[in-house]
Image (spheres, rainbow, N blue to C red):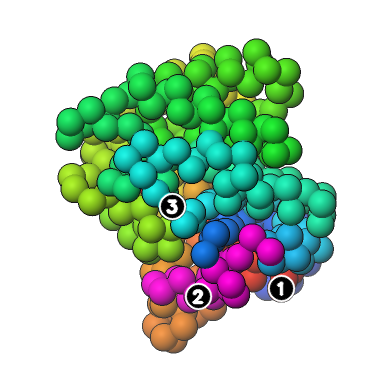
């Protein structure tokens, strides 16, 4: 006698297949990254990411209300400012591009607005914080991060997502928010963010490439995974409400391992380079269209609760 795989034999029936699926992509758990540009006068296509645009502040409310109608879980906002300086001071301007966009989006729809908090789009040198010589000064940068968080909070943001990988960024932001009466705003921390080549198309879209050096002194080494657990735990103890693993598809082991080590919600960020690879493979006909669904399922199967993906809009529109 050998075990008969009765259930598998029934999987030619789609309804039974769906009944038995252990995980599936769910649009209400997906977040769409949204670029808003201070200079744009119409949606500008992002080269390297077909189907992705930078929106003018005036049009971002309408766009996000469309995303809301598709039933997406939320948006993750990135700003492209018209002015940069050495200390990235536009990032905490109450009339800055992200702050204005948050206000517009909140009057147009109820979609949850998560704002990315970093300085690389705002500094003339493209690093994620304030420089001291050729190095990012971790502790000096925390003061600016706190100022950005407060300006986002005043604009009405729902969740703040610090992505700069500075040590202590979660507690600095948490304290600043709590002291100013914003204790109910959660923090989604980019806790395990790797120094990855997969951010290339994003940096072009956001104008955030470092003008010298790289981000390896603050982002993680892709040879490590235990380090991810240390980073997650540090952020959890500082008061993070949601942890993140980024990138996603090449880091499924890190998602799985993170899931075993925390009870916080975990967001996986499938980044710009992943989107481009998958999009190009499908568009050229090299791989079939179901590859998109396969790639959107994998992070959930690995244990992620939330998926940030540039496919969120098209997936939610079609499902
Ligand atoms: C900024 C930031 C980056 C991404 C999200 N926030 C780029 C970077 O660290 O250089 C990458 C997102 C993507 O590639 O889709 N710190
Ligand atoms: Zn940055």
Asked whether residue 47 is drawn in magenta, I would say: yes
Circle 3 residues within 10 Å: few <14, some 14–19, many ≥20: some
Q: Which label is found at residue 13?
A: none
Camera-side mark, 2 or 1: 2
Q: Where is residue 204 in the image (x, y as percent from the top left)?
A: 37, 63
Task: Tell me the distance, in whole angstroms, between the alpha carbons under discs 2 and 1.
Answer: 21 Å
Q: Residue tagged by mark 3?
A: 83
Left or right: residue 282 compared with residue 18? left
Quarter of the view holding residue 191: top left
Eye-nearest disc, 2 or 3: 3
Q: Is mark 2 on a helix, strand or loop?
A: strand
Q: 42 or 109: nearer the eye? A: 42
Residue 45: assigned label: 2
In the rendering, at what x and y percent does residue 245 appear? 46, 40
Q: Name the side, left or right, on which 179 lies relative to 260.
A: right
Where in the figure is residue 160, as x and y percent of width and height?
Answer: 60, 35
Residues in magenta? Answer: 40-58
Q: Using the image as rendered, state which of residue 153 and residue 196 is in the foreground.
A: 153
The residue positioned 69% from the left and 28% from the top of the image is 185
- Nearest to N terminus: mark 2 or mark 3: 2
The residue positioned 66% from the left and 49% from the top of the image is 100
- Per the image, label 3 sits on a secondary structure element best described as loop
Residue position for label 1: 318
Residue 1 visible in the displayed image:
no
Task: Indicate the quadrant containing the C terminus: top left, top right, bottom left or bottom right.
Answer: bottom right
């Amino acid at each position: 006698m050998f075990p008969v795989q009765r259930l598998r034999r029934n999987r030619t029936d789609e309804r039974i297949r769906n009944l038995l699926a252990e995980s599936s992509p769910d649009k209400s758990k997906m977040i769409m990254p949204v670029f808003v540009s201070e200079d744009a006068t119409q949606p500008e296509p992002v080269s390297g990411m077909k189907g992705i645009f930078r929106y003018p502040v005036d049009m971002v409310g309408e766009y996000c209300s469309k995303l809301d109608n598709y039933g997406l879980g939320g948006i993750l906002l990135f700003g492209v400012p018209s002015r940069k300086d050495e200390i990235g001071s536009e990032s905490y301007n109450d009339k800055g591009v992200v702050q204005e966009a948050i206000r517009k989006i909140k009057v147009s729809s109820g979609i949850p607005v998560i704002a990315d908090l970093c300085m690389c789009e705002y500094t003339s040198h493209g690093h994620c914080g304030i420089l001291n010589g050729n190095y990012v000064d971790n502790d000096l940068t925390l003061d600016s991060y706190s100022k950005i968080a407060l300006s986002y909070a005043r604009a009405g943001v729902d969740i703040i997502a610090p992505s700069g990988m500075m040590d202590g960024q979660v507690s600095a932001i948490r304290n600043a928010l709590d002291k100013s009466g914003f204790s109910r705003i959660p923090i989604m921390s980019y806790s395990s963010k790797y120094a990855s080549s997969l951010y290339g198309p994003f940096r072009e879209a956001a104008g955030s490439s470092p003008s010298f050096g790289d981000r390896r002194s603050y982002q993680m080494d892709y040879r490590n995974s235990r380090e991810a657990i240390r980073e997650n735990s540090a952020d959890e103890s500082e008061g993070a409400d949601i942890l993140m693993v980024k990138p996603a598809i090449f880091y499924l082991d890190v998602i799985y391992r993170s899931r075993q080590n925390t009870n916080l919600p975990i967001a996986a960020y499938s980044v710009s380079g992943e989107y481009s690879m998958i999009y190009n493979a499908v568009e050229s006909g090299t791989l079939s269209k179901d590859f998109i669904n396969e790639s959107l399922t994998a992070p959930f199967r690995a244990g992620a609760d939330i998926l940030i993906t540039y496919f969120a809009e098209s997936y939610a529109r079609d499902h």
